[in-house]
């Protein structure tokens, strides 16, 4: 007796179709599982055996072979349990004929027959829709998440015995789509808390308006981390497509998709001890890193020079391309990582800076500290600014609120959306897509000679100037806009 059902494997953040074939025949009782399963998949034999017995089904005392095709794709995780159990039940005629026709399944089995949530149900529902499946059977806890996908039926099940109702009049109905959490999943710190740093506030506003990367250097206590953690309060909400992309990543990584549904951009702040694989992605099977978790949001690297140099250098391709390509012997995985980099750094290991007159660091330590940020990576950062300790007298007056700044940012983003006819921010445009006059061309040429501006740097200055012009509600880029862009990009001389 032979039966086959469809399920999906999560590879990176995408779902790959897997066909579970079950062959049940006379012979010595055994249960073989083939098709490159990992330890969690191999252990599903015991979960399936107990779940069938505890759900009123008969576990066949026969020779059972379950194959997970394609056989050269490594299978990981417990999400194949439900499909394996369904294939065994179909092969032994314990399910109504046609119950599994054009249906995909995904879920983890408990020993009592209940079905537990699995990561990646959103991506699986999308893949089932593309494959033309009538419906995908998912754990009841994952039903509202999967229902975010239109064009595919969603059947939420709580227990294994509910598979007998598939295709019938009493089939579990499609659940309502996941709704945003109350209050947008919690309050966001307000930028009004940042006082005495008008230049830093302006840099944050420009970065938010155009989606630009930002590096802030200065002594401890100057407000660098405070400013970075308040950036989400002035960012525009996620668009519909961006929200689905962010939710897909969160779902595949086993995280809550609630913030993405609430249109809140991800904010990731890994510790400086993170490995290259933890930041960029990797492992076996490959898993997304922090840059992918920050997709459509913000990646904040505090104490940037404390990160490993190789780890920082790995950011170069993601910053340029918005994707990470992980190549393995049998396959290659492309992970999305369109994030906004915000970084903070001290001027030297002790934090005071060589120019303060109080620095206790020797010159070699300072050079090694600064060398963590190579010229190639620094050239890919749009805004680079130095701040000093604010005067304590400035703390008596509150700064401008996030709501006021966010209004200007939203207006600038709306101008960009109308101009590019899409959701791309200025930071994602090419210089050829931005019109500049002859006077601006001469100004950029002079700046290149005076400050050693690279070709990449020239393009980033143009994009910055376009954002400054959008904040000023100007149709064309003017000299004053380019001048401010050059100031924002100019790194402090060493």
Image: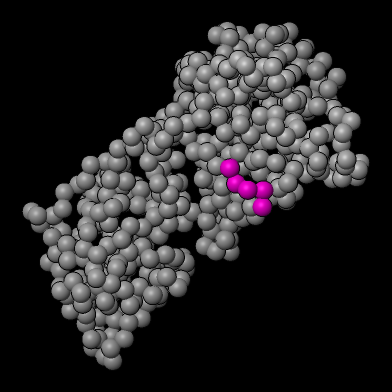
- In the rendered view, does 362 fall on the left or right side of 114? right
Residue 488 seen in the current view? no
- In the rendered view, does 134 fall on the left or right side of 339? left
- In the rendered view, does 139 fall on the left or right side of 307? left
Q: What secondary structure prevails in the magenta region?
A: loop
Pinpoint residue 447: horizontal percent, then vertical percent.
80, 18
Q: Residue at x 72, y 34 (%)?
A: 220
- The quarter of the picture where residue 51 lies is bottom left
Residue segment shown in magenta: 269-273
Q: Residue at x 69, y 50 (%)?
A: 311
User: Would residue 271 be counted in the magenta stretch?
Assistant: yes
Q: Quadrant of the C terminus?
A: top right
Q: Residue at x 35, y 52 (%)?
A: 121
Pinpoint residue 332: horizontal percent, then vertical percent.
55, 56
Pinpoint residue 129: horizontal percent, then vertical percent.
30, 47
Residue 153 seen in the current view? yes
Q: Residue at x 49, y 54 (%)?
A: 12
Pinpoint residue 211: horizontal percent, then vertical percent.
57, 27
**Given the current orientation, which residue lies at the most extreme bottom position?**
28
User: Would residue 173 be counted in the magenta stretch?
Assistant: no
The one of 202 and 396 positioned closer to us in this rendering: 396
Colour scheme shown: one colour
């Amino acid at each position: 007796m032979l039966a086959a059902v469809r399920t999906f494997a999560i590879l990176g953040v995408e779902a790959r179709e897997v066909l579970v074939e079950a062959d049940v025949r006379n012979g010595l009782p055994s249960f073989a599982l083939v098709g490159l399963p990992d330890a969690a998949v191999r252990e599903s034999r015991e979960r399936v055996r107990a779940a069938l017995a505890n759900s009123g089904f008969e576990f066949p005392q026969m020779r059972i072979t379950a194959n997970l095709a394609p056989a050269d794709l490594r299978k990981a995780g417990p999400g194949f349990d439900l499909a394996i159990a369904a294939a065994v039940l179909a092969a032994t005629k314990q399910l109504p004929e046609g119950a599994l026709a054009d249906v995909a399944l995904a879920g983890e089995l408990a020993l009592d027959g209940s079905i537990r949530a699995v990561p990646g149900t959103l991506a699986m529902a999308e893949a089932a829709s593309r494959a033309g499946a009538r419906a995908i059977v998912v754990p009841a806890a994952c039903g509202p998440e999967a229902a975010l996908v239109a064009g595919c039926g969603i059947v939420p099940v709580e227990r294994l015995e509910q598979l007998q109702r598939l295709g019938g009049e009493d089939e579990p109905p499609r659940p309502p789509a996941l709704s945003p959490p109350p209050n947008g999943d919690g309050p966001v710190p307000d930028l009004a808390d940042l006082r005495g740093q008008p230049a830093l506030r302006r840099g944050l506003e420009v970065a938010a308006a155009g989606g630009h990367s930002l590096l802030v250097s200065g002594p401890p206590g100057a407000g660098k981390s405070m400013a970075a953690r308040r950036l989400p309060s002035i960012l525009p909400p996620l668009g519909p497509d961006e929200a689905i992309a962010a939710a897909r990543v969160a779902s595949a990584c086993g995280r809550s998709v609630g913030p993405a549904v609430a249109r809140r951009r991800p904010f990731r702040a890994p510790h400086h001890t993170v490995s290259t694989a933890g930041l960029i992605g990797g492992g076996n099977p490959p898993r997304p890193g922090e840059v992918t978790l920050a997709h459509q949001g913000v990646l904040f690297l505090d104490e940037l020079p404390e990160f490993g140099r190789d780890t920082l250098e790995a950011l170069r391709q993601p910053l340029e391309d918005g994707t990470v390509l992980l190549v393995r012997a049998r396959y290659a995985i492309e992970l999305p990582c369109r994030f906004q980099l915000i970084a903070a750094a001290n001027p030297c290991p002790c934090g005071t800076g060589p120019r303060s007159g109080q620095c206790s660091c020797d010159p070699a330590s300072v050079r090694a500290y600064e060398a963590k940020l190579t010229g190639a990576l620094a050239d890919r950062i749009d805004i680079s600014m130095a701040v000093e300790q604010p005067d304590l007298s400035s703390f008596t007056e509150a700064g401008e609120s996030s709501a006021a700044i966010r209004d200007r940012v939203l207006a600038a983003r709306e101008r960009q959306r109308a101009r590019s006819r899409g959701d791309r921010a200025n930071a994602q445009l090419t210089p050829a897509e931005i019109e500049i006059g002859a006077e601006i061309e001469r100004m950029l040429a002079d700046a290149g000679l005076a400050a050693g501006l690279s070709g990449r740097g020239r393009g980033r200055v143009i994009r910055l100037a376009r954002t400054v012009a959008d904040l000023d509600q100007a149709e064309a880029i003017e000299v004053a806009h380019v001048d401010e862009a050059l100031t924002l990009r100019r790194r402090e001389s060493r």
